[in-house]
Amino acid sequence: MKEALYITMISKALLLQSALRGAASRTSSARSLARGLSGNDARFFASAVPSSSPPPPPPPPSSKKAAGGSSKADTTSPQQKLKTPSSADQALQSLPVSFSDISRAKVAIRNGVVRTECIKSFFLSELIGANVYLKPEFRQFTGSFKERGARNAIIHLMREHGSNLKGVIAASAGNHALALAYHGKELGVPVTVVMPVVAPLAKVDKCRKFGARIVIEGAHILEAKKYAETLVEKESLTYVNGYDDPPIVAGAGTIGCEIIEDVPEVDAVIVPVGGAGLIAGVSCAVKTLKPDAMVIGVEPEFCASYSAALKAGKPVAAPVQNTLADGLAVPVVGPHAFEVARHYVDECVLVTEKQISLAVLRLIENEKMVVEGGGAAGLAALLPGAKLDRPDLKGKNIVVPLCGGNIDTTVLGRVIDRGLAADNRLCNFYATVSDRPGGIAKLTALLSELGASIKDIYHERAWLHTTVDQVQVKCVVELQGKEHREKVRNGLIDAGHPIVWDIKG
């Protein structure tokens, strides 16, 4: 049933696009559409692209004159009106990526990537108050959605250059490097990856195992890219931008097609935003197939480059700080991706580091899914207290792509601790106790009675200057949540221990 509905939607969308290709073809296509669409189909056509639908036929001529008017009727035919495309039509046709590109990409890559299914989450749906579906793109072989664009880009270049394609090159420290290296090997195209010195060793080793030539150059990704561009000229390689090349965007857009296949009644798709390639492709596909669905972008507050571009009306450099969502930390969004995204995306919101860490924790505990910070950003925006925790999304069908799962083990440990702290299940405090024998023992006995599990404790003598017979003890304790936190805090105060709660830094 879902497949039949999806095929119908695809057919209508492609018919619609063919109707907008030019003046002559627009007239011909409109005639066939007028013959072929009626009832619900006609309403679908009208809702799909209201601004580019043909105008209604003129009213029949009337013999009666309107007051102060003329009896002359508008004799302009619908076909003549169609010859002049609207500004909306022209804008749609001028975009770097169209739904036709995404449809071709879907066919091109279907045998080379994992077709991930949207899975409804019982626990997250209860928590958020909506029907939440997760699309686990981290289950691709290299651990992220980047495989879709990488494979499509290589296939596109093979068709375009044939035997003249000497190889492809990219500057990347993460998921794009892995995806390009893997699919280059699968398709028999040499791949060179320039990685900065800060690139994780695990990802460097994986790229080597996939047969890519690895060049370590530059203190950060921008220096690595500059060096890669010199190799393009020296070795006649083709540079593949991981978020802005049109074939990359089209490959990412296949996620949107699959979302509509799996959840035809989707109301909102929440997409992480870095360089904007993913949200550009997904929004184009979703809005073409289901125009009334919302597409909302989510950025980390420490790198809001898409929001900065929207404000400026063009891609501009945004301030960047280290973030748990390192895969989204792109200082400037891609110009091609931005042009497509700004046309389709409804809005973009920001998430905090606290919300990102909490989203990673929720996925581990409730779904048994290990997702990197950037991949969990969409869910972070939906959690209680976040920007998308709002009435208009309650009870709706919401799809959240989980874009990647390549998180270092050491980083994962820190993210879990931060998530526990954000969830009031890990707290720290200073307590003042007697410096006589048994002083700390009484404190630990009290914490035991209150149900707190001590994770860390540090005895400090030098920095308390109020009295010589007392000392400070710094404690980190594991708790069960907000109510338990207040119980422990009040219990310490009632027992006469001066405390400093929730130490920062």
Image (tube, rainbow, N blue to C red):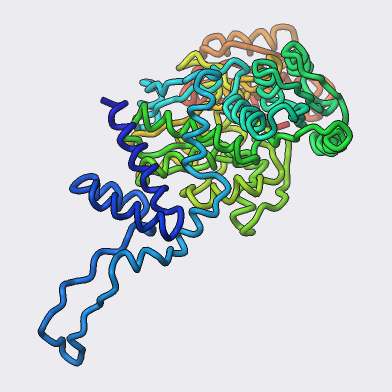
Query: Up-down: is 79 above or below 153?
Result: below
Q: Is residue 237 visible?
A: yes
Quadrant in which the N terminus is drawn: top left
Quarter of the image where one finds residue 199 = top right
| Residue positioned 66% across, 22% down in the render | 179
Of all residues shown, which one is farthest toward the left? 64
| Residue positioned 42% across, 28% down in the render | 258
Q: How many marks?
A: 0
Q: Is residue 433 visible?
A: no
Of all residues shown, which one is farthest toward the bottom? 68
Q: 13 left or right of 208?
A: left
Q: Nearer the viewer, residue 118 or 261?
A: 261
Q: Position of residue 197 (x, y in %)?
A: 85, 26
Query: Up-down: is 297 above or below 22?
Result: above
Quarter of the image where one finds residue 479 = top right
Quarter of the image where one finds residue 162 = top right
Q: Nearer the viewer, residue 58 or 139?
A: 58
Q: Position of residue 112 (x, y in %)?
A: 55, 18
Q: 281 left or right of 232?
A: left
Q: Nearer the viewer, residue 14 or 171?
A: 14
| Residue positioned 71% across, 34% down in the render | 240
Quadrant in which the C terminus is drawn: top right
Q: Nearer the viewer, residue 474 or 504?
A: 504
Q: Position of residue 264 (x, y in %)?
A: 32, 33
Q: Position of residue 203 (x, y in %)?
A: 74, 18
